[in-house]
Image (cartoon, helix red, strand yellow):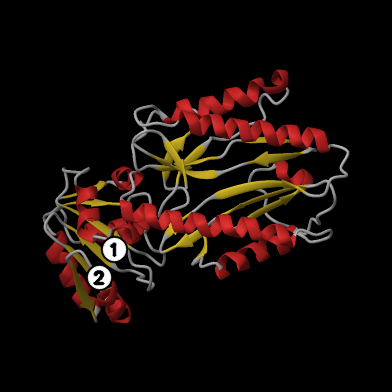
Amino acid sequence: MEHDAYLRGMRILGLCKEVDLALIMNTSSVDPNFLYVTGFSSGLFEYSFLIVKRRRISLATSVLEYGTAKKQANGGMDIVRIDRREDLRRFLKKEIEGKEIGINGSFLPYSIYMSIKKYRPKKVADISAQFIKARMVKDAGEINLLRKAVSITKRAMARIKTEFRDGITEKELAAKFDSISAELGSDGPSFRTIVCFGRNAAYPHHSPDETKLKDGDFILIDAGAKFKNYSSDITRTFIFGGKGKNRKEMADVYETVKEAQALAIAGIKPGIKGKEIHKIAQEHIDKAHGGKYKGTFIHALGHSVGIEVHDGPGFSPGEEGILKPGMVITAEPGIYIEGFGGVRIEDDILVTKNGAEIL
């Protein structure tokens, strides 16, 4: 399915009928919703303005980005070239004055909000929740891009095992993983690659450091590739070598996490709440081996993934949202034992009409 900016825009406006238009404005960073609507995968588009109306979409951008925008525009998008500051003022006055507008309040700084007020809109509403809701259910084109991003990361996970050796540092292995992903077609990492050796695997968001790999260590790698704006998020845990004195317990921890993930995925289907899926994994880990690992699963089972690696809610203990076909959510149970290490296994899961598919 070809990307259609108009359909994406209408999806957003359909969720916020109280506004006349949505204003998506980039700062020195790009609002993820700008990428969601336009589908652009090239160009910086700093301080560009996207106006989403019910009959058209307009992008006001500088001469530096104008050609890049024209080349990528689709779905009935008008591209307006801004040569001077006065051109921008004229454009915004025409589009905003007297209108009820929606903005992404979770992205724009207060100073930008105040500058928008100068153009005398009738109302300014924060529609950040509607942006997130619109992106929760993926269309066929988005799912295809996510499949590609996931495929790159899984192939990189398979190849990275050839780099395991005594003495390599976490930083070195993370760099090798990123290099392999780039060779396989990644546009860049979804987030900073996490590599944890041994006891460091007890900390879910440990930053790779100079810790060296040794026989009997856990190796936990949490990584993702971006492909045409879409992110993957995959975690694999390995046991390096076979002589560690804790080998049996390490294997027990691994199998417990693997079982928890399989049970949770089997429970995914449309119409149930996200928290119910978390509960399946949580209860399995808490009860396994007579309660030996109770309390060691210390985070939510998963989050939505898409344009952003954390693209919305998913499987958290308090998530009341109802699962729908087209949602893509991570399933990542873990056990973390300080002084010992930890295991996390993570896959990106597509909610289907009848259940779930591991991408």
Front residue of 21/159: it is 159
**Left or right of 176: which side holds 154?**
left
Front residue of 346/43: it is 346
Vertically, is 254 above or below 181?
Answer: above
Specify the farthest residue to the front.
354
Q: Is residue 190 visible?
A: no
Vertically, is 186 above or below 153?
Answer: below
Q: Quadrant of residue 203?
A: top right
Secondary structure of the residue carrying tag 1 is helix
Would you call the spot at circle 1 few (<14 residues within 10 Å), some (14-19), or many (20 or more)? many
Q: Earlier in the sequence, mark 1 or mark 2?
A: 1
Question: In the image, what residue type sits under mark 2?
Answer: Ala
**Left or right of 309: which side holds 78?**
left
Which residue shows up at 14% across the image and 51% down it? Answer: 20
In what quadrant of the picture does the N terminus appear?
Answer: bottom left
Q: How far apart are labels 1 and 2 at the CA level?
A: 7 Å
Which residue shows up at 61% across the image and 42% down it? Answer: 345
Question: In the image, what residue type sits under mark 1?
Answer: Thr
**Where is residue 298 shown, x and y percent of the image?**
62, 33
**Left or right of 268: which side holds 240?**
right
Front residue of 203/90: it is 203
Query: Which mark identifies residue 73?
Result: 2
Which residue shows up at 61% across the image and 31% down it? Answer: 259
**Where is residue 99 shown, x and y percent of the image?**
13, 54
Callout 1 touching callout 2 (CB < 8 Å): yes
Q: Quadrant of residue 50?
A: bottom left
**Left or right of 291: which side holds 35?**
left
Secondary structure of the residue carrying tag 2 is loop
Q: Which residue is mark 1?
A: 38
**Where is residue 108 shown, x and y percent of the image?**
35, 56
